[in-house]
Image (cartoon, coloured by chain):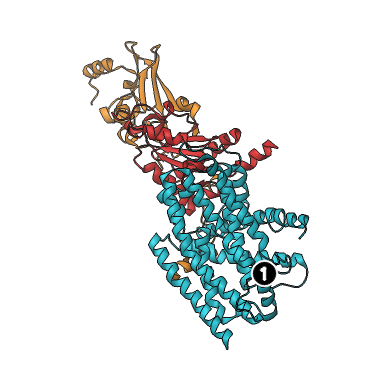
Amino acid sequence: MSITKLAFNMLIFPGGLFAVVISLLLMGIDRKIYARLQRRVGPPIYQPFIDVIKLLQKEILVPRSANFIVFRLAPLLGFIGMLVAVVIIPISGVYPGIDKSADLLVLLYLLSTPALAIMIGASASGSPYSAIGLSREMMVTIAYEIPLLIVLLTIAMKTGMAGGNFADFSLNHIVSFQQQNGSLIFNITMLPALLAYLCCIPGTIGVVPFDMPEAETEIAEGPTLEYSGSGLAMLNLTGGLKVVVISALAVALFFPSTLGGFWLVNLLWFILKCIILVTLSITVVRATRARMRMDQAFKFYLIVPTGLALVSLVLTLLSGKF
Amino acid sequence: MSNFIQNIGKKSPWLYRINAGSCNGCDVELATTALIPRYDVERLGCKYCGSPNHADIVLITGPVTAGVKEKVMRVYDEIPDPKVVVAVGICPISGGLFRDSYAIESTLDAFIPVDVNVPGCPPRPQAIIDGVAKAIEIWKERL
Amino acid sequence: MSSFLKIAFENLLKGPSTDKYPFGETFVPEKLRGKIKHNPDACMACHMCEHVCAGGAIHIEEAKDGSGINFVVWHNTCCFCGLCEHYCPTGAIHLTNDYHTAHLNKDKYNYIEKSFIKYVPCSRCGKPMVPLVPEMIEKVYGSEGDTKGLTKLCEECRRKTILKRGMFK
């Protein structure tokens, strides 16, 4: 790809400006629906934009026992990781993604950079609350990565077996396979994988019931405790971008259908699918469940989503061989 | 341009509560103001945050007893500028019902600069929302 | 678990139940204990409210030039307990239902309710006195007999008048 096209992709569409605007919009819609589910009038939908603008005007305080350089640069790591991840995911009908052969694996590595950034930033803060949040974040990351890996492997294998290989890790091939043979969401053997993926989403974003790393009432906001001003704004933006990446990945993996050939219509259809996914998997779950303990969450992740994903994996293997 | 940014920024003040030896009456009213659907404070863009480093408006309850005085001043220093202090209830303003006690040195005024007072024992949630609205106006000037 | 989902869905249908306060009216009960209002015409400066006040908010003092009595309530220590209203013998002090009490800190010592009870000279001996309130005459001397002339007399003259004239007929 030429340099200008790459720069345009990274900075304006679909990375950079477009991703930031969509992420703040999704966060705003989530907060509004969450408030309506509790019979409150919530904040206006553009509230996260105002939050970020306000945070950029606050003073920055660095604790005396903190490692100064690592403390200031850690939020940048997650932000840049997520920006690159948005460029990789194809939006069907609008943007082809980076057309290389193993970008699903690269995406899997990039999906863990925000958690790494929070961990590094928390350990550079030098406060005991951050240390507790850091260890909880590590355990939750280990817990949800297992079913996520199995789901991605299942989908790659399904695409690969239709093409003659064992597994095909290219996102473009996955999207075109679904456009020829019907979306994977309508395939009965893939339904457990979809459920497993939906179970992984709250853990990845850090929402109730799996938000014990940043438990407000227990450890005073955990890893983000010592951040203020622009560092906090960047951490919030990273969280929002992760929502976009996760939902865009779900759309690309399970239901990338298009509505005709015009790119604007496909773009709006994509945004609508993201909104529906976020509402069902994040907001409704957030409004009706309570926070889980660390051991309960670990046990849940090792039994339920992993079991569902393994069922899908076995069914795919069996249907591929015969 | 800076006026525009001030006007935008004033729509999302984040609140932080400090209990300086209070009887918890005013703290219950503060919890009511945010979490009950009836007096929703999120309409004004406010949010209760868990860390003093994220806060803009501080709500302090309780007479400042001798055991907690140092800690309140340390937590006050952790809050980044610009900030506004609101004293909720009559205890931080004048000692309240406990003004003759051996544990109270002085009012909250003597230690940290207070901007808005909301007397009452405890004040009604609507009066607290009034106080927060006044504090938002002062905060907008300092942004 | 499904009961929570049902509640959440019903909440979406019912709509918000938020009180409209800063942007509209709110519900104020009639007997809400709010800020203090003092009626100087019914007060006889017996210091009972000052004695009973839990927050030490009431101060009754003679004015510097001796022309009356100053009655001051500092709202920043009043805890709205209502003891002063309960123990006042004439009903001169009562709590309204005004709860708008937020103010700026620089007005802290100005946030008071102040009233002035003027001395009147006694119609017999000329000594300045607090005028006797009609409710007290009712309580102390009963309602029969000729009590109207007693309101303008100081307590010495009142005692002498009753002794000499024999008011209770």
Q: Nearer the viewer, residue C47 or A55?
A: A55
Q: Nearer the viewer, residue C25 or A178?
A: A178
- Does residue B13 appear in this view? no
Chain letter matching colour cyan? A
Point out residue A7 in the picture as x, y percentages from the top left corner.
74, 54
Q: Give the answer, above or below, for where A180 lies relative to A73.
A: below
Chain bearing mark 1: A
Kind of residue at disc 1: Ser
Q: Quadrant of the N terminus of chain A?
A: bottom right
Point out residue C49 in the picture as x, y percentages from the top left corner.
32, 29
Point out residue C12 in the picture as x, y percentages from the top left corner.
54, 63
Residue placed under numbered mark 1 in the picture:
A101
Q: Colour of chain C?
A: orange
Q: Quadrant of the C terminus of chain A?
A: bottom right
Point out residue B56 in the picture as x, y percentages from the top left corner.
52, 39
Q: Give the answer, above or below, for where A207 lies relative to A234.
A: below
Q: Give the answer, above or below, for where B111 lies relative to A23.
A: above
